Image: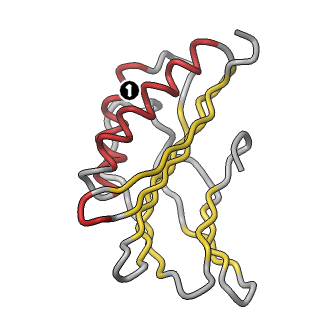
Amino acid sequence: AAYAGGDFYDWGLGQGGRFYAALGDVAGHGVGPALLAASCRAYARVLAGVLPPAQALTRLNARMAADVREGRFVTFVLACVDPRTFEVEAASAGHGPLLVVRAGGEVDELEVRSPPLGVLAEVEEAEACRATLGPGDALLLVSDGVY
């Protein structure tokens, strides 16, 4: 149990062929955070497939607020890429940085504004940040546990 952790990631295809990537980190180590990470990943997988990132994040927070005990929280980011336009839409719950590394070496940081999941039972609609990827650009999501 001492080796179990709360870091997780996932990716897949959503509506309209959008590619999504999710990354999360539950505060703490052990079986409790690992189980919370598994439930968060499952909720996120369902929501990411059918909702834009900001709406998915808002609904995910509502689900997680019921599961998270006092003193725990989950940082989380969900990013979707439209395969036709290469527009990135991302929403973050206290997770960052979210970086776009341009082919020429420049780095753009996308803004994150929502609190971690489970901190507040009700939050205003999450905000999405956007960027467009060009040839050779990369979206970089980082965490202290998953690179």
x and y, in percent, of residue 45 in the image? 37, 41
Q: Is residue 38 left or right of residue 17?
A: right
On screen, 15 above or below 41? below
Q: In which quarter of the image is residue 105?
A: bottom right
How many numbered badges does the structure rendering display? 1
Query: What residue is disc 1 on?
Result: 65
In this view, the residue farthest toward the top is: 1
x and y, in percent, of residue 110 in the image? 56, 69
Residue drawn at (37%, 75%) of the image = 83
Q: Is residue 57 left or right of residue 101?
A: left
Q: Is residue 114 left or right of residue 99?
A: left
Residue drawn at (67%, 14%) of the image = 30
Q: Looking at numbered disc 1 in the image, what kind of residue is underneath it?
A: Ala
Secondary-structure class at tag 1: helix
* Mark 1 crowdedness (10 Å alpha carbons): few <14, some 14-19, many ≥20: some
Q: Quadrant of residue 17?
A: bottom left
x and y, in percent, of residue 5 in the image? 67, 24
